[in-house]
């Protein structure tokens, strides 16, 4: 063993790349458990806090919105001052935010504390993929992304089951308290085990104006889509917010065309693989991220299941993803990302069509088929797409590339909830909208059950169309096998 390899293994005898993967994997597990538990627990939290469905949607969207707004800032700061330092701070902030959420006494308070969690989540997400990409050589990144995908899948398995048990035997506050020991362990492990491998790029500037225009526009869109249900789609506030979204995003596009610093580094998007791979990830998130919420609400409000029963019924989705994710990563290392990613997206479109047929009288078999197809598709898409995009980025710009990918994904995720809510509400008779979306109880009567399933079907149909557009993006991005072989080795 040469001196460089010996240094790379460190005192523990374990290669640094596996140490780095273990820390980022723990962060992924914490985030996955949190997101799946919160989605499952929303109906219970809504009733306990005497809140409504729109506010509960903001419990989800508020977290994602904050992590989206700050992703690029923390990615740029990480490239300037060190991504390991930023990643470790993210663990600590996320943990504090989780503790605060457990003590929320009202819906708005919970939304506020989820914003704190979102800041910590941004620190973690902006740097996790960059740390993995930096630690692993080009030909092994697909496997590393696949292992990371397993963690997300396992977190999505543990989360619903743990959430169901918590809601059956404990209070909803424990949904957030379970993050605390994981966060403390991750913070300590990160500070002890991780080290900076890239050279910080001091002296760079950050595009504050671009961040404000981009995030302000997205915020206006989300408020308009979610509050339009109660305000009316053609009310002055709703139309004003839609108009503000268009104006702010137009100004953002104009500001990015000028010289100087940029919120989104234009040099990264000159790569076809990076540009269209990111577009595919954005559209996939926009189409798919609200599906779990729709299914959970369908099971509890329409089928009358308990949270634990709902958790067990959606478990096959995560189980399938945990098996397919690493296999897809290995396939992408051998043949490139285009084939597995495109097939995965087409399967997810098919799953949306299957799930759109659900009614109050549907059997579990119909739901199970849709979940299995959805899981296979998600497993085939995620790790090949991530590996391709990160592999196409220059080594010295990994932090910004990771943050760019995560920013667009998060934008798709947060918009997914608001869009699904708006499409579902638009398909429901106005007299029933208030009972379903603005009431303080999750229990639905027979008329509202039928109306909700119709609205859900419309939302899933829109998701199917969007994910088909995402599959076109993966085809345009092209085969990544040649690009990957030509990529520079990981730093260190």
Image: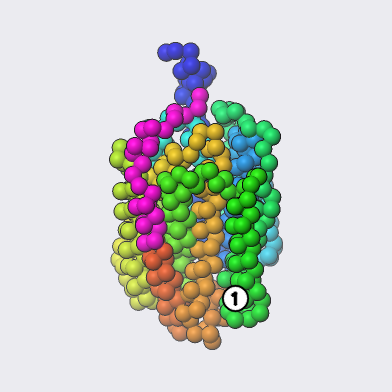
Task: Tell me if I can see residue 483 in this picture.
Answer: yes
Choose between 304 and 204: the one closer to the eye: 204
Which residue does the image show at 42% across and 45% down from the upper left?
A: 273
Left or right: 336, with 111 as reference point: left
Choose between 280 and 46: the one closer to the eye: 280
> Magenta stretch?
468-492
Choose between 33 and 19: the one closer to the eye: 19
**In magenta stretch: residue 35:** no
Q: Percent x, y for residue 343?
A: 31, 53
Q: Residue furthest bottom?
A: 431
Which residue does the image show at 57% across and 60% down from the upper left?
A: 60
Classified by dominant secondary structure, the portion drawn in magenta counts as: helix
**In magenta stretch: residue 485:** yes
Left or right: 462, with 408 as reference point: left
Q: Is residue 402 above or below residue 190?
A: below
Which residue does the image show at 69% across and 53% down from the upper left?
A: 209
Which residue does the image show at 43% across and 54% down from the upper left?
A: 280
* Quarter of the figure with residue 45: bottom right
């Amino acid at each position: 063993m040469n001196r460089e390899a010996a240094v790379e293994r460190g005192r523990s005898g374990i290669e640094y790349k596996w140490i780095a993967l273990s820390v980022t994997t723990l962060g992924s597990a914490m985030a996955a458990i949190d997101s799946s538990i919160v989605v499952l627990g929303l109906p219970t939290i809504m009733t306990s806090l005497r809140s409504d469905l729109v506010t509960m949607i903001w419990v989800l969207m508020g977290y994602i919105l904050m992590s989206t707004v700050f992703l690029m800032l923390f990615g740029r700061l990480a490239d300037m001052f060190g991504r390991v330092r930023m990643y470790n701070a993210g663990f600590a902030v996320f943990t504090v935010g989780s503790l605060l959420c457990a003590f929320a006494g009202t819906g708005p308070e919970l939304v506020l504390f989820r914003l704190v969690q979102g800041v910590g989540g941004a620190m973690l997400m902006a740097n996790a993929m960059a740390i993995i990409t930096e630690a692993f050589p080009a030909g092994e990144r697909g496997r590393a992304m696949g292992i990371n995908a397993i963690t997300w899948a396992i977190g999505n398995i543990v989360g619903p089951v743990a959430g169901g048990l918590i809601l059956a035997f404990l209070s909803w506050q424990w949904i957030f308290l379970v993050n605390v020991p994981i966060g403390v362990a991750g913070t300590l492990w990160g500070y002890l085990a991780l080290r900076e491998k890239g050279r910080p790029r001091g002296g760079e500037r950050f595009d504050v104006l671009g961040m404000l225009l981009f995030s302000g526009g997205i915020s206006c869109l989300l408020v308009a889509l979610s509050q339009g249900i109660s305000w009316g789609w053609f009310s002055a506030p709703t139309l004003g917010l839609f108009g503000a979204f268009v104006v702010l995003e137009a100004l953002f596009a104009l500001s990015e065309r000028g010289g100087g610093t940029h919120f989104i580094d234009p040099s990264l998007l000159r790569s076809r693989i990076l540009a269209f791979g990111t577009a595919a990830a954005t559209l996939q998130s926009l189409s798919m991220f609200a599906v779990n919420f729709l299914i959970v609400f369908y099971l509890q409000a329409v089928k009358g299941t308990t949270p634990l029963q709902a958790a067990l019924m959606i478990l096959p989705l995560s189980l399938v993803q945990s098996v397919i994710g690493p296999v897809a990563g290995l396939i992408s290392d051998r043949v490139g990302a285009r084939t597995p990613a495109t097939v995965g997206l087409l399967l997810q479109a098919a799953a949306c069509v299957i799930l759109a047929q659900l009614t109050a009288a549907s059997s579990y078999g119909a739901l199970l088929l849709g979940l299995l197809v959805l899981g296979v598709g998600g497993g085939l898409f995620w790790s090949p797409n991530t590996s391709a995009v990160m592999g196409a980025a220059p080594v010295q710009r990994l932090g910004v590339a990771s943050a760019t990918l995560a920013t667009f994904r998060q934008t798709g995720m947060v918009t997914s909830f608001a869009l699904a809510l708006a499409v579902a509400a638009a398909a429901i008779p106005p007299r029933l909208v208030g009972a379903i979306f603005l009431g303080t109880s999750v229990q639905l009567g027979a008329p509202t059950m039928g109306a909700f399933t119709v609205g859900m079907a419309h939302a899933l149909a829109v998701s199917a169309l969007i994910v088909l557009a995402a599959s076109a993006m993966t085809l345009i991005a092209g085969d990544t096998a040649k690009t990957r072989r030509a990529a520079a080795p990981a730093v260190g």
